[in-house]
Structure formats: C-alpha cells, structure tokens
Amino acid sequence: MKKIVAIIPVKGNSTRIPNKNIKNLAGKPMMAYIIESTLKVKSVDRVVVTTESKELAEIAKKYGADVPFLRPASLCADHTTSLEVIQHTLKELEEKEGYVADYALLVYATSPLLKSERIEQAINIALEKDSDSVFSGTYDKGHYWKEIKGKWKRLYPIELLCSQFQEPLVKENGAIYLSKTSVLEKQLLADKADVLIMEKGENIDVDYPEDFAKVEKILSSK
C-alpha cells in the first residue's frame, strides 16, 4: 500500500470573505466539510491541516484533522504558492517525525461540496496507473484567442469543426491535486498527469461571497 497524506491549507485571514475558512456554512465551519470528507477516504493515511492560526488549528483538531505544527506567517502571504505550502509541510513531517509519504493529496477548504468518493476515485487512478500526478477537471469545448503584440490570434481550436466533433480540452477545477512526493520537490503536477473528469458545477470553489451563498443554499437544501 502506498502511503498518502492529505494536506489542507487554511489561513486565518482572507480578503474577499472575512474569516471564510471558519465562517458558519449551513451549521458548521466551512473547512469542516473538506476535513470530514477526506477523513472518510480509507486510502488516506493522514489528514494534515497547515495553518498559521492557533484558532483555526483548534477548530481543525475538533473535526478530526492533525495539526502537528503551525505554519510560518511568511508562508501565508497572498503570493505564497500551494507548492511552497506543501513542500514546507512534507519537510516538517519528515524532519520532526520521520514521516515520509509516497503521495501528497492537496485539497482545499474552499471545496466544501467535494465528495469523499471523488477523492477515492482520484487515488484509485493513481494507484492503478502508478501515476506521477492526478488532478480533477472538467471538459471544455470553448474557443480561445490570445493577444500577441496588440493583435488577437486563435489559440484553440485551430481547425474549426462542429461542436460534436471538436476534441475538448480539460480545465482544472481546483478540487483535487494528487502527486508523488518526488514530483513535489520541483512542481505541483507532473508534466504527464492523469485526470479525474468531474461534471461542471460539481465542485464550487468558494472565492467570492456569491460562491458562499450558492454553496450554502445547496447544503441547506440537503
């Protein structure tokens, strides 16, 4: 069995929705949903929340997550990348506990609708194919142009076809990022990755107040 550690980054401050990670969402803090969903995944060895906030750390522990350390404030700035946060987490786990995982699963508190079954499917793809990386995404049959030196150039598709014959692109939906820890030494996803296809709207990334309201309505209706 491969050892898989789930990493959930949460920050105390948020710009668009104040305190959004612990904001009450249909009866519990928003970040509780992804913690609970990930804990249900049997193939996940450990669920680690990385945060700089003692308050958020205590709430994460209450819902069953492991918070073995607090993240430095320098890794909580707006320009900090998810890769930097994961690398720090893996380094801390190895240096302080001797804990080394084969895969790291990155999921976000801003994905409260993400189901444990979907996480399990992504992991199954990785284990069956020995994938370097697996990410979740949706099919996209959009037409795209790029501005080059003040002029617009068709980027995709180059050959125009009826929509039923057009090969779709795949767009990341921000729900699941799973990579071998060896890949994460350099990048978030391997150059060649496998994909878990999800339906559009299946995952809503809560980034704006209107996203929060939409998700709250969905959860309350259930």
Image (tube, helix red, strand yellow):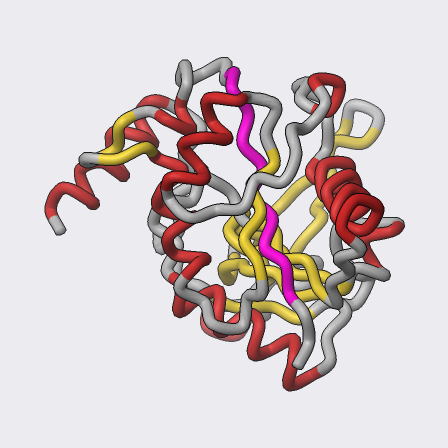
Apparent side of residue 60 relative to residue 186 in the rendered image (left or right): left
Viewport quadrant of the N terminus: bottom right
Residue 9 within the magenta-colored segment of the rendering = yes
Residue lying at 50% horizontally and 14% vertically, measured from the top left: 15
Q: Quadrant of residue 98?
A: bottom right
Query: Is residue 104 one of those drawn in magenta?
Result: no
Q: Quadrant of residue 210?
A: top left
The magenta stretch is: 4-13
In this view, the residue farthest toward the right is 186
Vertical placement of residue 123 versus 190, above or below:
below
Spot the residue most to the bottom.
128
Q: Is residue 198 above or below residue 62?
A: below
- Is 190 displayed left or right of 64 in the figure? right
Q: Please state the horizontal and vertical placement of residue 183, each as a whole percent of the image.
A: 83, 59
Q: What is the x, y in percent for residue 65?
A: 48, 46
- The x and y percentages for residue 49 are 56, 41
Asked if residue 54 lies left or right of residue 117, the reply is right
The residue at the point 75 percent across, 67 percent down is: 102
Residue 48 left/right relative to 204: right
Between residues 105 and 169, which one lies in front from this camera angle? 105
Q: How many marks?
A: 0
Instruction: Name which residue lies at 45% across and 30% down.
Output: 58
Pick the residue in front: 99 or 141.
99
User: Which secondary structure is most common in the magenta stretch?
Assistant: strand
Q: Residue at x 51, y 19 (%)?
A: 12
Q: Position of residue 56 (x, y in %)?
A: 47, 27
Hey, which residue is sitting farthest left in the picture?
A: 221
Pick the front one: 21 or 50: 50
